[in-house]
Image (tube, rainbow, N blue to C red):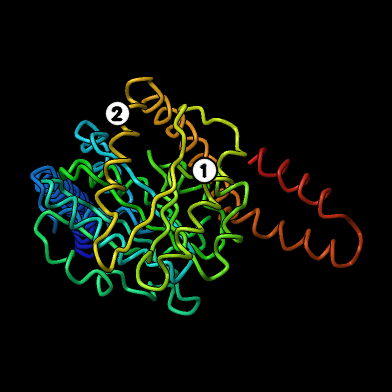
Amino acid sequence: MAKSTNKSALSQHKGISASENVSDSAAERIKNLRKRKQNTTTLLQQLLNGNKTALGKAITLVESNQVKHQQQASEIIEGALASAGKSIRIGITGVPGVGKSTFIETFGSHLLKLGKKVAVLAVDPSSSISKGSILGDKTRMENLVKENHAFIRPSPSGDSLGGVARKTRESIILCEAAGFDVILIETVGVGQSETTVHSMTDFFLLLKLAGAGDELQGIKRGIMEMADAIVINKADGENLKPAKNAKLEFKRALQLYPAKGSTWKPEVLMSSALYNEGIAAVWDLIESFEKNTKKNGYFEQNRKQQSKFWLLQTINEQLKQSFYQNPEIKVALEEQLQEIFDQKTTPFIAAKQLLEKYSKL
């Protein structure tokens, strides 16, 4: 009888301990949740106050693939939305060697003198081994990075279309919320489609290089149609005459393209970022573009269309991730691949069966 009583007491003691453990675990989760919420709120407030360190941390959260970081990033972006959208977003592209980084540093320094706050989202090519940035824009813009009203964020492009980091659009929102009124987005410029950067900017600037066959290479329908301005860079010294010739060639080429929906007529300018020549004229042109497109309503309409584009892109991306990460689909995919290898089915039939299976899960 005594043994039975002891067992009962022991059982009750274990039950209480288990209950206490569950309670303690739940309390710990709630505590961590509150702590994370508090940290997120603090980070957001610091960002809205223009703290560059907080901005860097927020962008790191946006770029992270960890679930808890993605949740924090979503909360920060939602809190930042009301303060975003008040900048001019400028996409800058061009082939390697055209002098994008030097141009951006000189151009950014000019804007700072005008009282602007400048953020540079420079998308580096990614190493195929480490997946990290391999050019290091901060080292290539050593003067601009020291300025208090400038923010430079190099991000590895990964496998994103056009060399644009997957989370660049969210980073733009955060930079705007932090008070930066000019956002410069530098793309890799190694031949991928530039549609992505065009779909997140207000003004698309194409840098060209004369005297290297680039004037002929540059006259391509897609990139020329997207450009709101073409700037022949490195127009100095012995390269000045070839730059003038290239300017004429591009002006002739632009006349062959249909009018833009913005009614804006792209212009061709020359600059020497090294000697700070022609830089002011580029900004004057961008200001003229902004004034005209805001007046005719294109500026706002374009941003609405971009938001629609990114909504659809995000849905496509999340559906794709959900499909390939599903455990049952992973197994079925391997089975269908083997069927294709054995010539028992075709890729089209296999894809249809996989999608039908996914829709029923």
Q: Residue at x 34, y 46 (%)?
A: 90
Q: Quadrant of the N terminus?
A: bottom left
The earlier-in-sequence mark between 1 and 2 is 1
Residue drawn where x is 52% and y is 65% of the image = 190
Residue 345: x %, y % from top left: 89, 56
Rendered position, 280 above or below 135 = above
In the depicted structure, whether residue 179 falls above or below residue 217: above
Residue at 31% over, 51% down: 184
Residue 189 locus on image (x, y percent): 48, 62
Specify whether residue 224 is in view. Answer: yes
Name the residue nearer the viewer: 72 or 300: 300
Taking depth in this image into account, of 220 and 125 the one nearest to the observer is 220
Say left or right for 14 vs 46: right
Q: Which mark is residue 291?
A: 2
- Name the residue furthest top: 296
Q: Residues within 10 Å of mark 1 (few under 14, many from 20)?
A: some
Direction from residue 209 to residue 139 in the image, left or right? left
Q: Amino acid at mark 1?
A: Met
Q: Quadrant of residue 332?
A: bottom right
**Residue found at x 60% / y 38%:** 257
**Left or right: residue 342 compared with residue 141:** right
What amino acid is found at the position of numbered circle 2 in the picture? Answer: Lys
Q: Which residue is mark 1?
A: 226
